[in-house]
Amino acid sequence: MGVSNQAVKAIACFVELMDHLQDTWWPTAPAAGAILDRTGYVAELGLSTIDAEGERIENLAELVGVAQGFEDVDAFLEQSVLEWPTPTPSPRTIRESP
């Protein structure tokens, strides 16, 4: 079973976008904005009639806004990981060693 032409085109567009972003130094916020613009994700969400999609658009705008405080993607991701809550395992998920 092969891959559809639509999937091949989508993959090619994604690879082109990644190549473009790698070839140029981008501050974090413009890079995030470029990805959202070039993929058409926000535009697609805006066409939806589902209420939750508006919340997703707000979340993406907040992501780009927070990214403006960082000069590079590495620093942004490092800080994001440091602030990400660490899940506490429930007693059911902790197994005793034999």
Image (tube, rainbow, N blue to C red):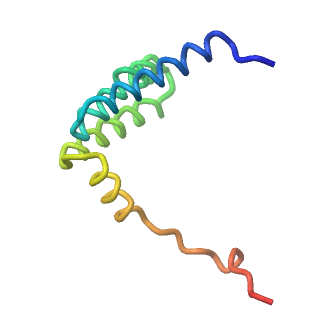
When asked about the image quadrant of residue 23, the answer is top left
Expressed as whole percent of the image width and height from the top left, the position of residue 17 reads 40, 24
When asked about the image quadrant of residue 8, the answer is top right
Report the side of 88 relative to 27 (left or right). Answer: right
Above or below, 66 against 79 in this view is: above
- Name the residue: 55% across, 13% down: 9
Q: How many numbered markers are drawn? A: 0
Expressed as whole percent of the image width and height from the top left, the position of residue 20 reads 34, 25
- Name the residue: 30% across, 26% down: 34
- Name the residue: 39% across, 27% down: 19
In what quadrant of the picture does the N terminus appear? top right
Above or below, 26 against 46 in this view is: below
Above or below, 75 against 51 in this view is: below
Report the side of 84 relative to 1 (left or right). Answer: left
When asked about the image quadrant of residue 85, the answer is bottom left
- Name the residue: 48% across, 34% down: 52
Residue that sits furthest to the top in the current view: 5
In what quadrant of the picture does the C terminus appear? bottom right
Expressed as whole percent of the image width and height from the top left, the position of residue 55 reads 40, 36
Residue that sits furthest to the bottom in the current view: 98
**Residue placed most toward the observer, 32 or 87:** 32
Above or below, 66 against 92 in this view is: above
